[in-house]
Image (tube, rainbow, N blue to C red):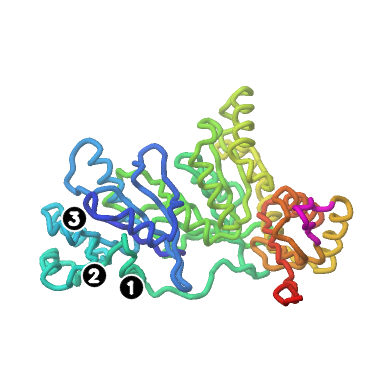
């Protein structure tokens, strides 16, 4: 699982700027759904071999009792609860405030691993200017400048240093290993109901495995001789006794489950329709390259008109998951659940499919003979041969000349041919183009 870093501090100390530095992107996943403020962002970052998830929070007032500040405090408390490391950001130029003392007192009471950073410290001497922050009782003060990128790398190393991270990747595709299946979706779509239906009806061998992810449960079980490891992103049990009133859904748990899974079951709610948050989660699944099966729950609770609206919404908002199998189920009534297992196995087999180079090259040449790529000015792309460049997700590498001029439409045409030949249902397929270099290009006549 990726470690989680939460950025906490009062307003306008530079948390969002630091977030963009740590993720090296402004394309943060926005958790825009009921019960969350829009100031809470999630993003992934990587330094060296270590990947991590960063949570950007709004201005924190631990003692806020009403209004939007109370809601922002609740969301920040949730971020702190699910974080492995808390980065407490203070303003080096504005100096220490009473609100900083309140936040520090709250963090000390929780006993979380905490890193205290003084932002906006560019051009300032460490020493007298930062000495007042030692009053917070959180140890050493680390000076950074998020706006100028100073001290960011050291901050990340410091935050991850004591977590004992493993350099190995746990998303393997070993033939005898169990298939790790993550059930992902918005709150109250029926994830726990579905899992309970599986465990009860199929009478599977299951036991609680603590310690895999915080506030989540991993359930190993076996069906028809195939071992699975099920991860419920909603959490079948809760350890966060302090935050029982906060909604059980956590975006970060979904991201961690997706990253570590072999197959993701994306569960939708027919009664609530297809929302932007469904599209966010689906987009992250696609970006992560995970095999996926889509299931629409509570299908028995909607009429024919609503069913048509849901089907149209899936086509429009989740059109990029056309390669995934789509099933309509009712977890509460245990309808349609049996069909999910063949789809899950098919998606996993497609993700780890081995594609021989001679077969790929034959398919490529047949596709070119059927329809050549369009000419671009003086250049017409020439596709020569193809081979497999990876699996989970499958990667096909195509070699030739002037391949930078191959259009996206032609790549989709090739993808359709490859998918049909190898029956790649339920897995993303990535096609990479590698152009051969002309050895005479830089020589004078």
Numbered disc in front, either 3 or 2: 2
Q: Label 1 vs label 3: CA separation?
A: 23 Å
* Magenta stretch in the rendered image: 372-382
Residue 327 lies, in percent from the top left, at 65, 41
Of marks 1 and 3, which one's residue comes earlier in the chain? Answer: 3
Residue at image location 73% in from the left, 50% down from the top = 412
Question: Is 63 placed above or below 204 here?
Answer: above
Q: Earlier in the sequence, mark 3 or mark 2?
A: 3
Q: Give the prevailing secondary structure in the magenta stretch.
A: loop
Which residue reaches farthest front? 445
* Quarter location, residue 356: bottom right
Does residue 133 appear in the picture of this structure?
Answer: yes
Image quadrant in which you'd find residue 204: bottom right
Where is 435 relative to 184, above or below?
below
Pick the front one: 187 or 151: 151
Circle 2 Cα neighbour tier, 10 Å, few/some/many (<14 / 14–19 / ≥20) = some
Residue toward you, 221 or 115:
115
Marks 3 and 2 close (CB-CB < 8 Å): no
| SS at circle 3 | helix
Q: Is residue 181 or residue 217 the one in the foreground?
A: 181
User: Which residue is the site of mark 1?
Assistant: 154
Q: Is residue 238 left or right of residue 115?
A: right
| For the residues bearing labels 1 and 2, Cβ distance under 8 angstroms | yes
Quadrant position of residue 157: bottom left
Query: Residue tagged by mark 2?
Result: 142
């Amino acid at each position: 699982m990726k470690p989680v870093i939460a950025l906490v501090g009062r307003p306008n100390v530079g948390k969002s700027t630091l977030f963009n530095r740590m993720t090296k992107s402004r394309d943060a996943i926005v958790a825009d759904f009921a019960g969350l403020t829009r100031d809470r962002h999630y993003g992934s970052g990587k330094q060296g071999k270590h990947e991590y998830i960063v949570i950007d929070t709004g201005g924190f007032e631990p003692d806020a009792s009403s209004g939007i500040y109370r809601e922002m405090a609740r969301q920040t408390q949730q971020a702190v609860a699910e974080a492995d490391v808390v980065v407490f950001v203070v303003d080096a130029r504005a100096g220490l405030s009473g609100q900083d003392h309140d936040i520090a007192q709250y963090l000390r009471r929780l006993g979380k691993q905490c890193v205290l950073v003084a932002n906006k410290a560019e051009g300032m001497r460490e020493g007298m200017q930062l000495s007042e922050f030692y009053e917070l009782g959180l140890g050493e003060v680390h000076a950074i400048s998020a706006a100028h990128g100073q001290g960011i790398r050291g901050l990340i190393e410091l935050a991850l240093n004591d977590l004992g991270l493993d350099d190995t990747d746990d998303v393997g595709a070993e033939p005898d290993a169990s298939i790790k299946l993550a059930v992902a979706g918005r709150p109250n779509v029926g994830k726990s109901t579905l899992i309970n239906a599986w465990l009860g009806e199929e009478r599977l061998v299951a036991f609680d495995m603590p310690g895999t992810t915080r506030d989540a449960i991993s359930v190993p079980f076996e069906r028809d001789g195939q071992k699975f490891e099920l991860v419920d992103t909603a959490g079948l049990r809760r350890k966060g006794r302090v935050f029982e009133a906060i909604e059980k859904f956590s975006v970060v748990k979904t991201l961690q489950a997706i990253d570590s899974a072999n197959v993701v079951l994306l569960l939708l709610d027919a009664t609530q329709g297809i929302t932007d948050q469904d599209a966010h989660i689906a987009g992250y699944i696609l970006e992560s390259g995970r095999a996926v099966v889509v299931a629409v729950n509570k299908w028995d609770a909607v009429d024919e008109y609503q069913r048509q609206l849901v089907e149209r919404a899936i086509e429009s908002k989740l059109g990029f998951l056309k390669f995934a199998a789509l099933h309509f189920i009712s977890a509460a009534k245990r309808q349609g659940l049996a069909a999910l297992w063949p789809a899950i196995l098919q998606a996993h087999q497609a993700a780890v499919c081995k594609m021989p180079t001679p077969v790929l090259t034959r398919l490529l040449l047949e596709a070119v003979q059927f329809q050549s790529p369009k000419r671009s000015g003086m250049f017409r792309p020439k596709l020569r041969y193809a081979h497999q460049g990876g699996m989970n997700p499958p990667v096909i590498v195509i070699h030739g000349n002037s391949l930078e001029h191959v259009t996206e439409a032609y790549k989709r045409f090739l993808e359709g041919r490859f998918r049909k030949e190898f029956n790649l249902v339920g897995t993303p397929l990535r096609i990479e183009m590698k152009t051969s270099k002309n050895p005479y290009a830089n020589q004078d006549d």
